[in-house]
């Protein structure tokens, strides 16, 4: 199954890029970004009193909070939909990984080396990454961590997870897939679902954490599609849904308009918020 998954993704990337080498493959994960290491560098502040979220395409986001926290989620910043020519973050406080697949781990190791950020993920995945002990934060569902004015909760996701550091070596089990709830003091509560289908536990996430904005995959095939994402929004009781994980490969055919149609059928309160790739959006 793992071999088939890798083959399908690789074929999709070839179709998009016209090359046999896909961006963000394990061979590229350990290569530091260009420029001098910037550990300890100060990130640009979010607009006063606002949380700013920048979508980098696929499932990759960078969150800046009013209290100065800068958090990257699933930083595959070289994905085919990433903003062309955009500078990658020079400063990060935390990197959140939902699971071990290459299109989510992305440039996490290089960014951690460059910025000194702590990397959060499942215990097994973090152990496989080979990070310095001071930067490696392995946890599991139920874990809670504080990063400046952001409280990060690890929650469940329904998906597989494996990690392949060397493209010539077998993939290794990387623990359970995760989602993240990021509650910002005096601001929004964000839910990044990672790769998942809908599950009844989303109702508990709604009850316990009360997310206001949900970043949900809608592409289908490897995750839920628009119809399932609409059901997820219903379970989560959110006001805003940011669609992600669609259009990167030909197989990911779900789209925001289809999601709007499915939400309309359910007559719920959730509205689709389209993020422009590479443009910070204030929440």
Image (cartoon, rainbow, N blue to C red):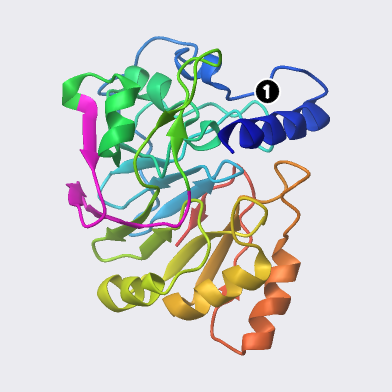
**Vertical relation: 161 (above or below) 155:** above
Considering every residue shown, the one lying at the far bottom of the view is 267
Q: Which secondary structure lies at badge 1?
A: loop
Quadrant location, the C terminus: bottom left
Q: What's the residue at 26%, 66% (across, down)?
A: 186
**Vertical relation: 198 (above or below) 167:** below
Percent position (x, y) of residue 236? 43, 75
Percent position (x, y) of residue 220? 67, 57
Q: What's the residue at 54%, 14% (across, down)?
A: 27
Q: Nearer the viewer, residue 210 or 92?
A: 210
Q: Nearer the viewer, residue 15 or 93?
A: 15
Side (left or right) of 222 relative to 137: right
148 part of magenta stretch: yes
**Vertical relation: 90 (above or below) 264:** above
103 part of magenta stretch: no
What is the magenta range?
A: 135-159
**Can you identify the residue that label 1 sits on?**
22
For label 1, count other residues whose C-alpha is less than 10 Å away and answer few (under 14), some (14-19) or many (20+). Answer: many
The chief SS type of the magenta part is: strand
The answer to whether one can see residue 117 in this image is no
Number of marks in picture: 1
Percent position (x, y) of residue 115? 33, 23
The answer to whether one can see residue 228 in this image is yes
Q: Quadrant of residue 231?
A: bottom right
Percent position (x, y) of residue 268? 56, 87
Q: What's the residue at 26%, 74% (across, down)?
A: 208
**Vertical relation: 54 (above or below) 229:** above
Q: Quadrant of residue 2?
A: top right
């Amino acid at each position: 199954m793992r071999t088939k998954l890798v083959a399908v993704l690789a074929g999709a990337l070839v179709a998009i890029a016209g090359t046999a080498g896909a961006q963000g493959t394990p061979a590229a994960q350990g290569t530091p970004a260009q420029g001098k290491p910037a550990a300890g560098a100060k990130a640009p502040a979010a607009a006063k009193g606002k949380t700013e979220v920048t979508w980098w395409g696929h499932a990759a986001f960078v969150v800046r909070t009013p209290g100065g926290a800068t958090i990257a989620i699933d930083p595959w910043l070289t994905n085919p939909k990433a903003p062309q020519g955009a500078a990658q973050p020079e400063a990060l406080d935390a990197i959140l990984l939902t699971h071990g697949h290459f299109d989510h781990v992305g440039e996490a190791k290089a960014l951690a080396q460059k910025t000194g950020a702590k990397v959060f993920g499942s215990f097994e995945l973090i152990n496989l990454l080979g990070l310095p002990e001071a930067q490696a934060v392995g946890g599991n569902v139920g874990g809670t961590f504080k990063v400046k004015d952001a409280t990060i909760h690890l929650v469940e996701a329904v998906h597989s997870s494996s990690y392949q550091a060397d493209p010539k070596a077998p993939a290794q089990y990387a623990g359970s897939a995760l989602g993240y709830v990021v509650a910002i003091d005096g601001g929004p509560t964000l839910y990044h679902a990672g790769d998942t289908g809908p599950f009844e536990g989303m109702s508990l996430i709604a009850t316990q954490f009360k997310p206001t904005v949900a970043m949900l995959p809608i592409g289908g095939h490897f995750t839920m599609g628009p119809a399932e994402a609409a059901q997820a929004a219903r379970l989560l009781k959110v006001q805003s849904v940011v669609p992600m994980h669609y259009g990167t490969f030909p197989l990911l055919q779900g789209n925001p308009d289809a999601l709007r149609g499915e939400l309309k059928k359910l007559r719920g309160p959730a509205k689709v918020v389209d993020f422009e790739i590479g443009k910070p959006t204030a929440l």
